[in-house]
Amino acid sequence: MTDNRATASQPTASQPAASLPTDPGPAASRPAAAAATAPPARTVPPGSSPWQLARRELRRRPTVRVSLCVVLLFVLMAVGAPWLGALGGWSPNEFDKSAIDPYLAGQPLGSFGGIGSAHWLGVEPVTGRDLFARVVAGAQVSLLIAFAATAIVVAVGTAAGIAAGYFGGRVDAVLSRLMDLTMSFPSLIFMIAMLSVAKDVNRIVLMTAVIGLFGWPGVARVVRGQTLSLKHREYVDAARVAGAGSWRILTRDVLPGVAGPVIAYTTLLIPGMISTEAALSYLGVGVRPPTPSWGQMIAESVAYYETDPVYFVIPSVFLFLAVLAFTLLGDALRDILDPRGGRT
């Protein structure tokens, strides 16, 4: 007589496997727990363009949002400089002798360089000119020169880089040697010498042209490298086989492909242009008085940094914030629009 209890406890061949008791154990339960606690992955909407991805990425970074707000503030300050100066009640070159003490070598009356309801950022020693009006007007001059010089650099550099990379051969050799020659030239010494000997000319136009003359090879090299990698792509070969001319291929196929790195490089050029203009004005070969400039104001305030440190701090802080904001914004755009270039 057999033991039915023993045979009933053993699984038969016809018994489904699902009915077998299984012990998941701690190792099997870990993936489920990790999946339950893991944060949801960010999903990218299908069909998103690079610019939509860039805007989405920029909104995620708080430092970029702050720097973008500062950049927009400086741009609005430069555009509305005449109205802001009138809002403060003083023009950049208007003297206020009542705001300085003639018995103390023209030192500003009151604390912190004469800051008050009449002069929001104080006044200059000796002259009594309103610092708020001059800082705002200096922002207009500095950003105008920086933006205009950057536009020249980007236009010339992009055209030269695309031509060198697409046509190759002798065109590439000539343009590449011209880039090397321009980059090896002592640009700062030439700028100082040329601006020193030029007398009866528009200083803003001259500074824009001189700064733009030496800045284009960097953009040209970046664009040339991008063009070399784009001109053998399938869509470019297809356009060439379809009978499209060189101008159509360059403007419709190659130029959009290099737009991202160029925009990122452009944003990084602007703080360098602002610093260059300030340095030349500081050395006395840039913008001439009475036209205000941040670099010129810093140079004039050095003589008063012990007796009136506010006069030195205010234009320095504005210059620092402008350069820092453009630099942070440019770094973020480079990481998003040209990630490979950001790693090199």
Image (cartoon, helix red, strand yellow):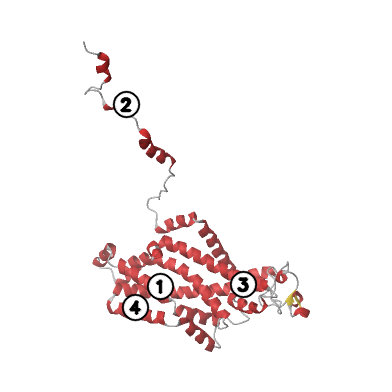
Q: Mark 2, mark 1: which one is toward the viewer?
A: 2
Residue 315 coordinates in the image, percent (x, y): 61, 72
- Residue 140 numbered mark, or none: none
Amino acid type, label 2 = Pro
Q: Is residue 269 above or below residue 202?
A: above
Residue 219 — which label? Answer: 1
Residue 155 in sight: yes
Q: In the drawing, does residue 103 fall left or right of residue 190?
A: right
Query: Where on the picture, by quarter, is residue 182?
Result: bottom left
> Which residue in the protein does label 4 denote?
176
Q: Earlier in the sequence, mark 2 or mark 1?
A: 2
Q: Please provide percent x and percent y for residue 45.
A: 40, 50
In the foreground, 258 or 100: 100
> Disc 3 marks which residue?
315
Residue at mark 4 to residue at mark 2: CA–CA distance: 75 Å
In the image shown, does 243 or 328 lie closer to the viewer? 328
CB of mark 4 within 8 Å of CB of mark 3? no
Label 4: few (<14), some (14–19) or many (≥20) C-alpha neighbours in 10 Å: many
Q: Is the residue marked by circle 3 packed among few (<14), some (14-19), or many (20+) residues within 10 Å?
A: many
The amino acid pointed to by label 4 is Ser
Give residue 21's mark: 2
Q: Is residue 77 above or below residue 10?
A: below
Tell me the kind of residue under disc 1: Val
Query: Which one is nearer the viewer's eye here, 30 or 251?
Result: 30
In what element is the residue under mark 2?
loop
Q: Quadrant of residue 167 in the image?
A: bottom left
Observer-side mark, 4 or 2, equals: 2
